[in-house]
Amino acid sequence: MQLTRCHADPARAGKRVRTFHYGGVKRTAMTVPGTEHLGLPEVFPQLESVEVGLGWLGRWTRPVQIAATVQAPVLRSAKVRAALARWSERLPGSQREPDPDGRSLVIAVARDGHGRPLATTALTGPDPYEMTGSLLAWGAARAAQPDAVLKPGAHGPVAAFGLETLRLGAAEAGVHEVDGASARRR
């Protein structure tokens, strides 16, 4: 997800697949657009790009990436999107609840203007739905605390809470950094 000083490239899901090592095993991650590429440059202006990949699809990463590539032009039609939404409600697992045994794997690479990695991190946490809900609940509870000092306006979580506080909140939500994760372009 390349960005300029003012805006981010609205990269589609699955634009790239990256590999990384986690738990001694080579894993794949599909890039996804997110808010990191908008929020992190506020705190770290030297960043030129932030790329986030989700590694929870396992062997289905490549097929999902291909499907995302093929469907991207088709999904520009509101009628097609509405039909797919109706159809997807009937798919097995569409009413899925969080899986207590599920795990999230996320890798993020921050790059400079020449594409050189400045920082790479891999995170693991609970089921994706549980992780998202827990992080949102933590942020809302933290922001509502009487001693919370927040800048007015919209900010990314690092700018809003500070990096160390955000790390503690992520840990409370069950999200932890993976030691020794390494990533490469593919």
Image (cartoon, rainbow, N blue to C red):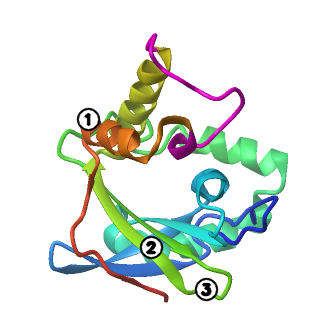
Q: Position of residue 130 (x, y in %)?
A: 33, 36
Q: Is residue 153 magenta?
A: yes
**Mark pair 1, 2: CA separation:** 23 Å
How packed mark 3 is, by other alpha carbons closer than 10 Å (few <14, some 14-19, many 20 or more), is few
Type of secondary structure dominating the magenta stretch: loop
Amino acid type indicated by mark 3:
Gly
Quadrant of the drawing holding the N terminus: bottom right
State which mark lies toward you, 1 or 2: 2
Q: Is residue 125 above or below residue 70?
A: above
Q: Residue furthest top?
A: 146
Q: Residue 171: name its quadrant.
A: top left
Q: Are marks 1 and 2 in contact (CB under 8 Å)?
A: no
Q: Residue at the location (77% across, 51% down)?
A: 80
Report the magenta residues as a range.
145-159
Is residue 96 visible in this depiction of the protein? no
The residue at the point 54 percent across, 37 percent down is 89
In the rendered image, which residue does mark 1 sit on? Answer: 172
Residue that carries the numbered disc 2 in the rendered image: 119
Q: Is residue 45 above or below residue 77?
A: below
Q: Is residue 143 above or below residue 23?
A: above
In the rendered image of this protein, does residue 170 appear above or below residue 121?
above
Residue 115 got which mark?
3
Q: Is residue 165 left or right of residue 64?
A: left
The secondary element bearing badge 3 is classed as loop
